Image: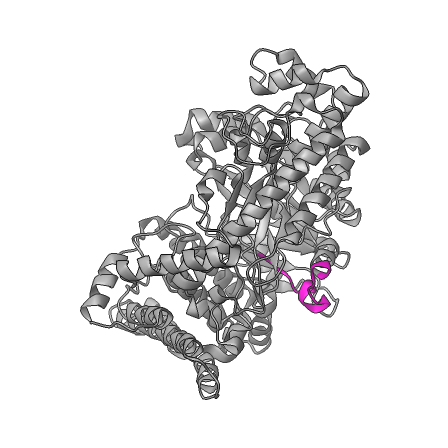
């Protein structure tokens, strides 16, 4: 059927819940150690271990499948390295001692700081994964072509020992990938001997596809879809399920689709089924709660300035809409040249809270060019994981590598550099809120706390980059990123063309609204004293609800098309993005700021009360979204506020939640109306939108009777989830978003 819900797709979907990975990582490590293999170079040892594992892990093929390949590990944790560590405890201890020495030598410190003290203020840690590798290259030259490239590089003179070992490690991992794919082909042929005639023919075809693409380039659309999935699977087996994202899949798969369609090898219905089966492979992972971040980017401007929407774009949207699943995560690029039909299809799909998230190309491309991307690379950006923008196959951006709690910067500024709840001194002494004579003095204190914290974050990222470079090589990932083969260095050792770290922010809007409230109520209208405000903040407004009501209801708030409040958010965002970019990654590249928070909006629970009326224990709003319930002037006013912000420095990403009742913008006319509203927002300067369609009544009923709402999907932040599987705090936060309706 054209919509992709064939009997086969339904059969595969029904069987997912019965599938469980069986390979034990500990058993693999025991088998490896029994071989006595002990290569001194860790990268090469890990590469050989990977090849060994590919000959041992299970290769199940399930009923009805045409796209095969299964994530094998029983022991699994999102954003954690899954391949067992072949280092001995003694070697690991020596490596950490070396990391400490290198860190102290670079910083001039006599010890490594206790970064745990800063856990409520910032997070810093280098990600493996969170990258878009060169899927297009794999399709073009195959794994065999990659081995040939490595062999040619190994023949060159002037390589040092580390470069040679890196290249050999890459060769081992590619050969390991060939082994695994070939084993799947052999398993398909084995099963064909026992299967009924119809299924036996399919299994023989699967065997032929796997045998062909184990080392050779893709020849057909089926080959290409299967090879893309095997590449994804191998990356995650090597490094972990950590937002390895597909980039512009509708672009690099389209030539195979077009050629097969023209020569009669493929029908549109068959292509839709293959896309649906690939989607189900991404849906099939060990935990429906931990987000694997397998993002797909659709549509948008091409490097030559033309539009990239094609028939595969619609097949991808249709697969998500018809299957009602939220992996892979769709992201849709929109610009002036985007067809109306495409924008409407994006909105219609998003009504199910499964995505896609929507990006404005003109604004995003300009921000990337300002950071230093070429025009071609900027126009070719893809989305990683949840929100983050990157150049496919050319960078190791670590876009979720750091997060800062902006509200906590303000807390320290108000309390002389100490936490209000514990009194622990963490930042410089800059005075107390009730001592400041004007808003400018508080701003100066805030800036000192911010800059001190960002300096510490820069050191935290340095430490983690050193740890990553010594302890977590990723040979397969590296071979598929431009620059590593040429430099002879792993992505963890900054071999990619560009290596940096993204810094996301939580509490930006609440902090700006706090400055606005102070300016308006304390220093301009003088209806509120700093003494009373300071007392209320220190007691979390427990004894002065009238004060909190005044802060919430009388002070202007961002999200209502109020220039006074909106300008405060704009200026604060510009300042924070500028300060982040002043800090450098060990590679020398500036850190990349992002006006989004991901789950760090929950950091509001660990921030003191603030002058905007925020209570300690309450989450912040996400990204550049207004505080829950304060945007009282409607959707268009909220979008006008967000369009006033300066996204030119936010080259990592920005997020705006657009929360709508389920019955609003329904039907064909409603979808068209919302599409036009969003296009107007983008024309006025907005960068990104994620749509939430919510029903407060339904969500509250689901909390009471979860067994009756097991399939209820909600948008959490950069990912979707089943509402009943969220913890109570997140459920309550999602319900808070319905305050306006």
Residue at image position (71%, 19%) is: 553
Position of 521 compared to 12: left or right?
right
Please give the count of numbered marks on the rendered protein: 0
For the C terminus, which image quadrant? top right
The location of residue 620, given as percent across then percent down, is: 59, 32
Q: Is residue 464 magenta?
A: no
The answer to whether residue 660 is seen in the rendering is: yes
The answer to whether residue 625 is seen in the rendering is: no
Q: Is residue 392 above or below residue 676?
A: below
The location of residue 510, given as percent across then percent down, is: 65, 31
Residue at image position (50%, 71%) is: 480
Position of 736 compared to 723: left or right?
right
Answer with the quarter of the image where residue 301 lies.
bottom right
Q: Is residue 728 above or below residue 479?
A: above
Q: Is residue 611 above or below residue 17?
A: above
Position of 570 compared to 239: left or right?
right
User: From which residue to which does the magenta span run?
Assistant: 369-383
The location of residue 169, given as percent across then percent down, is: 38, 74
Residue that lies at the very extreme toward the left in this rendered image: 34
Answer with the quarter of the image where residue 259 lies.
bottom right
């Amino acid at each position: 059927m054209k919509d992709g819900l064939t009997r086969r797709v339904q059969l595969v979907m029904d069987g997912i819940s019965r599938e469980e990975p069986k390979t034990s990582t500990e058993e693999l490590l025991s088998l490896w150690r029994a071989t006595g293999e002990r290569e001194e170079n860790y990268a090469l040892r890990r590469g050989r271990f990977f090849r060994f594992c590919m000959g041992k892990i299970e290769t199940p093929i399930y009923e009805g499948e045409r796209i095969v390949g299964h994530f094998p590990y029983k022991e699994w944790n999102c954003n954690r390295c899954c391949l067992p560590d072949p280092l001995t405890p003694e070697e690991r201890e020596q490596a950490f001692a070396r990391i400490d020495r290198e860190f102290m030598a670079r910083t001039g410190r006599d010890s490594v700081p206790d970064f745990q003290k800063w856990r409520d203020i910032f997070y810093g840690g280098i990600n493996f994964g969170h990258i878009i590798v060169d899927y297009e290259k794999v399709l073009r030259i195959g794994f065999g072509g990659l081995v040939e490239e490595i062999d040619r590089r190994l023949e060159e003179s002037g390589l040092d020992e580390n470069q040679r070992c890196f290249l050999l490690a890459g060769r081992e991992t590619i050969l390991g990938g060939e082994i695994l794919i070939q084993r799947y082909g052999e398993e398909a042929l084995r099963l064909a001997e026992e299967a009924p005639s119809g299924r036996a023919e399919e299994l023989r075809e699967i065997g032929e596809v796997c045998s062909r693409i184990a080392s050779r380039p893709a020849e057909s659309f089926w080959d290409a879809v299967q090879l893309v999935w095997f590449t994804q699977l191998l990356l995650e087996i090597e490094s972990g399920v950590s937002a390895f994202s597909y980039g512009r899949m509708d672009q690099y798969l389209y030539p195979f689709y077009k050629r097969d369609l023209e020569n009669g090898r493929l029908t549109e219905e068959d292509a839709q089924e293959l896309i649906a089966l690939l989607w189900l492979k991404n849906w099939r992972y060990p935990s429906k709660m931990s987000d694997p971040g397998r993002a797909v980017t659709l549509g948008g401007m091409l490097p030559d300035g033309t539009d990239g929407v094609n028939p595969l774009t619609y097949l991808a949207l249709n697969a998500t809409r018809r299957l009602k699943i939220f992996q892979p995560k769709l992201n849709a690029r929109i610009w002036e040249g985007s067809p109306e039909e495409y924008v409407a299809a994006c909105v219609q799909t998003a009504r199910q809270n499964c995505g896609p998230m929507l990006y404005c190309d003109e604004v995003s491309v300009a921000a990337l060019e300002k950071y230093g991307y070429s025009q071609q690379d900027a126009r070719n950006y893809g989305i990683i994981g949840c929100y983050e923008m990157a150049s496919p196959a050319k960078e190791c951006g670590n876009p979720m590598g750091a997060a800062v709690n902006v509200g906590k910067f303000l807390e320290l500024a108000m309390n002389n550099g100490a936490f209000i709840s514990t009194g622990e001194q963490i930042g410089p002494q800059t005075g107390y809120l009730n001592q400041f004579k004007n808003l400018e003095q508080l701003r100066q204190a805030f800036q000192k706390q911010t800059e001190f914290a960002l300096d510490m974050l820069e050191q935290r990222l340095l430490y983690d980059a050193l740890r990553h470079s010594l302890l977590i090589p990723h040979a397969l990932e590296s071979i598929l990123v431009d620059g590593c083969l040429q430099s002879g260095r792993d992505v963890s050792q900054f071999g990619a063309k560009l290596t940096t770290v993204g810094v996301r922010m939580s509490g930006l809007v609440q902090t700006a609204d706090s400055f606005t409230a102070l300016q308006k109520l304390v220093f301009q209208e003088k209806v509120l004293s700093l003494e009373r405000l300071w007392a209320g903040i220190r007691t979390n407004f427990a004894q002065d609800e009238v004060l909190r009501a005044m802060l919430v209801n009388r002070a202007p708030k961002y999200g209502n098309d109020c220039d006074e409040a909106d300008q405060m958010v704009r200026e604060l965002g510009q300042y924070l993005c500028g300060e982040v970019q002043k800090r450098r990654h060990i590679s020398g590249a500036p850190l990349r700021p992002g006006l989004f928070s991901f789950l760090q909006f929950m950091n509001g629970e660990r921030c003191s009360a603030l002058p905007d009326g925020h209570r300690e224990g309450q989450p912040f709003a996400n990204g550049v979204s207004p505080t829950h319930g304060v945007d009282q002037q409607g959707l268009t006013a909220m979008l006008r506020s967000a369009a006033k912000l300066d996204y030119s420095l936010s080259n990592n990403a920005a997020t705006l939640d657009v929360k709508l009742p389920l019955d609003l913008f329904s039907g064909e006319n409603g979808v068209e109306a919302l599409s036009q509203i969003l296009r107007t927002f983008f024309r006025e300067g907005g960068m990104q939108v994620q749509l939430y369609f919510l029903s407060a009544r339904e969500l509250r009923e689901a909390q009471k009777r979860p067994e009756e709402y097991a399939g209820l999907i909600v948008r959490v932040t950069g990912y979707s989830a089943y509402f009943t599987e969220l913890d109570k705090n997140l459920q309550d936060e999602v319900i808070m978003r319905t305050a306006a309706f």
